[in-house]
Amino acid sequence: MQSESGSLSRAADVEVSGDLVIRFDELCRANLARVFNYVRYRVLNTVVAEDVTADIFTSAFENLNSYRSERGTVSTWLFTIARRRVADYFRRSRRSVDSVPLEMALSESVHIYFEKIGAQAVDAARIVQTMKHLGDHEREVIALPVGASLSSREIRDQLGLKPGNVDVILHRSLTKLRTLLIEGGDSRG
Amino acid sequence: MDNVSESEQTLATRFGRWIDDRLTGASSPVEYGESSLERGLAQALISWRDEPSAGLLRRVAAIPHGT
């Protein structure tokens, strides 16, 4: 099938269980931007994020018949794959996010002005640099809602957290990021 | 999770709602007035979201064809 727009229109219908058929192109259309942005916030590098995202959808396509609707939504299943692939990336490349280049941040032209932080303008590069000082779990809890637009309930399901904990961890992570920015955390180690 | 006071939970829940409302474009978003820095930070992070490039779209579209 050829797309008029040349984008995601090449359907591949895969029967996964019983009458359930997943159209791969629809899966991509609904989730590609969310998965891409989730990965981008995790690896902090647009080029790497594109590679990892392509791997995620390849893996999803190859494993579509492993999806079981009784275990959760297709989106939840896809993000489980995404989280594993990001973990694989860090393991395989023996990298922590600290050594990942920051093309994404440095190419950003947007500057975000805050009301405080010493009355300084804080640009995207500085925030991304500072995000390196957050723990893996903290970055994950930021990437899932902000990058992937997952709801608190979906994040709870992904991370196996109790109700309310997602909000607390997210709040603490952003508070820590704020503190690091104020203290100049971007200039550390 | 350890040591979550009722006030922190309330604050965090409201902050979570504040972010949800911005992400979903809620018509009557919840107010969150405790920290302008956290609001600004969350807004900055949200603003970094980007669309997949044409190259990524092509790569993903080609997956069913093994190319």
Image (cartoon, rainbow, N blue to C red):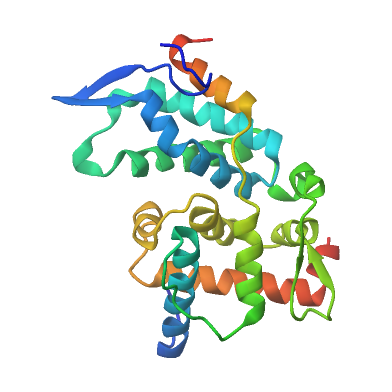
A169 on left or right of A161: right
Q: Position of residue A117 (x, y in %)?
A: 79, 78
- Where residue A12 sits, quadrant-wise, is top left
Q: Quadrant of the C terminus of chain A?
A: bottom right
Front residue of A41 and A185 = A41
Please tell me which residue lies in front, A100 or A76. Answer: A76
* Image height of A182 relative to A185, above or below: below
Q: Nearer the viewer, residue A5 or B2?
A: A5
Q: What residue is drawn where x is 82% and y is 48%?
A: A106
x, y (%) of residue A11? 37, 18
Tell me the quarter of the picture where residue A185 sits.
bottom right
Residue positioned 40% across, 23% down in the render: A61
Residue found farthest to the left: A18
Q: Which residue does the image show at 28% across and 23% down from the upper left?
A: A65
Q: What residue is shown at x 69% (from left), y 60% (from top)?
A: A131
**Quadrant of the snapshot with the N terminus of chain A:** top left
Position of B7 relative to B59 (above/below): below
Whole-percent x, y for residue A33 in the image: 52, 40
The relative height of residue B34 versus residue A67 in the rendered view (above or below) is: below
Where's residue A120, x and y in %? Answer: 85, 74
Would you say residue A16 is visible in this rendering? Answer: yes
Q: Is A32 on the left-hand or right-hand side of B39?
A: left
Q: How many marks?
A: 0
